[in-house]
Amino acid sequence: MTQSITIRRPDDWHLHLRDGAMLAGIAPETARHFARAIIMPNLVPPVVTGSDAAAYRERILAAIPEGADFTPLMTLYLTEDTDADDLAAAHTSGLIKAVKLYPAGATTNSHSGVTNFDKVRPVLEKMAEIGCPLCVHGEVTDPAVDIFDREAVFIDRVLDPIRKATPDLRVIMEHITTKNGADYVREGGDNIGATITTHHLIINRNHILVGGIKPHYYCLPVAKREEHRLALRQAATSGDASFFLGTDSAPHADAAKESACGCAGCFTATNTMSLLAHVFEEDGALDKLEAFASLNGPKFYGLPANESTLTLTKTDAPVDFPNKIETGAGPVTVFDPGFPVFWTAD
Ligand SMILES: NC(=O)N[C@@H](CC(=O)O)C(=O)O
Ligand SMILES: [Zn+2]
Ligand SMILES: [Zn+2]
């Protein structure tokens, strides 16, 4: 008997679509399965104003294949110079759904981010007042802090103080990678949620470093010890409404990954839904996949779940995903889970 499961169409609550030839090459990979995605604003230069977001949205819509039902949900990149009134106008009009906080220097294209968190306090207060959520890249950049501890330290030094000072601010801790992050969000009440990526459910730090360095598994926050991966699996498959899918699919051309100073980011848009079916089946939690991928995110953002559906079907033979997506900006390697996957998505 063929095993299949039909869920409401999923959304991706953390996605990098880039721009130009890369955008054109990879946008169809997301639009195939996902109805909506929160579009990260870390372009060069970043998406800082409402008018930047409106223009970027048009470029995205132009890159979506004809007939695809996909809506980009735009965000602004928070800087120390962000204009609270421009932000509020962009949120009130419905143009943006969230604002993204990058600690300066924490990740790809984050140099325009925030160094002094006190400087953005008035903007955060405005966001709390108008109900605009803050998406957070949760890592400190203090060189004295070990890279594997940067998420846990961020919670204590930055995130918790911000939330105590502005308790009405709704916060999404993006791409959590630790048990500390999962526990903090689970116990944090209704105003905090977290996205979890597909790859952090699959790899731990050994996958990056054992048997030769694997640049395509390098992303930020970097994958941690196995106990943390297991804590993320538990959170994602629990059905807890605080946790939802944000793939953080982050394409870089292979030449930029396979380099002496390789870029951070895993590209999973192509096979994410099949991989999630595998992961949730392995944990005996296929009945929780819809909550994680299609229900909890819209609920947190105050949006309706999608009416259309996606069907995941178990196959007899492993699915043959492309190794690379060819784009005008060069080939992009698709995330390899390291095991055969027997699920298709349509
Ligand atoms: N996750 C990553 O490793 N990279 C992202 C940036 C980010 O989400 O931190 C990117 O834009 O490439
Ligand atoms: Zn990030
Ligand atoms: Zn990201």
Image (cartoon, rainbow, N blue to C red):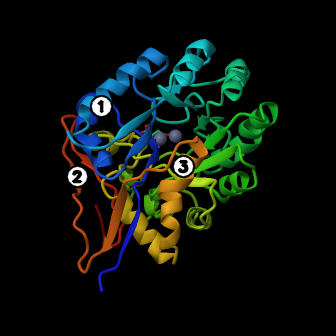
Q: Quadrant of the N terminus?
A: bottom left
Tell me residue 27's x, y (percent).
29, 40
Residue in the image at 52% along x and 59% along y:
292
- Can you see residue 6? yes
Instruction: Classify 10 Å Cα crowding around label 3: few (below 14), some (14-19), many (20 and above).
Output: many
Gap in angstroms between the C-alphas marked 1 and 3: 22 Å
Q: Is residue 217 left or right of residue 106?
A: left
Tell me residue 107's x, y (percent).
51, 36
Residue in the image at 35% along x and 33% along y:
18
Q: Which mark is residue 61?
A: 1
Tell me residue 254's x, y (percent).
27, 44
Q: Give the secondary structure at mark 2.
A: strand
The earlier-in-sequence mark between 2 and 1 is 1
Gap in angstroms between the C-alphas marked 2 and 1: 23 Å
Q: Where 190 falls versus 314 (above or below)?
A: above
- Asked where in the image residue 276 lies, by quadrant, the reply is bottom left
Q: Which residue is mark 3?
A: 297
Task: Say how many tags the image has.
Answer: 3
- Asked where in the image residue 250 lies, by quadrant, the reply is top left
Q: Nearer the viewer, residue 146 or 71?
A: 71
Q: Nearer the viewer, residue 41 or 70?
A: 70
Q: Give the secondary structure at mark 3.
A: helix
- Asked where in the image residue 167 lies, by quadrant, the reply is top right
Q: Amino acid at mark 1?
A: Leu
Q: Which mark is residue 324?
A: 2
Residue in the image at 18% along x and 45% along y:
326
- Can you see residue 341? no
Q: Amino acid at mark 3?
A: Gly
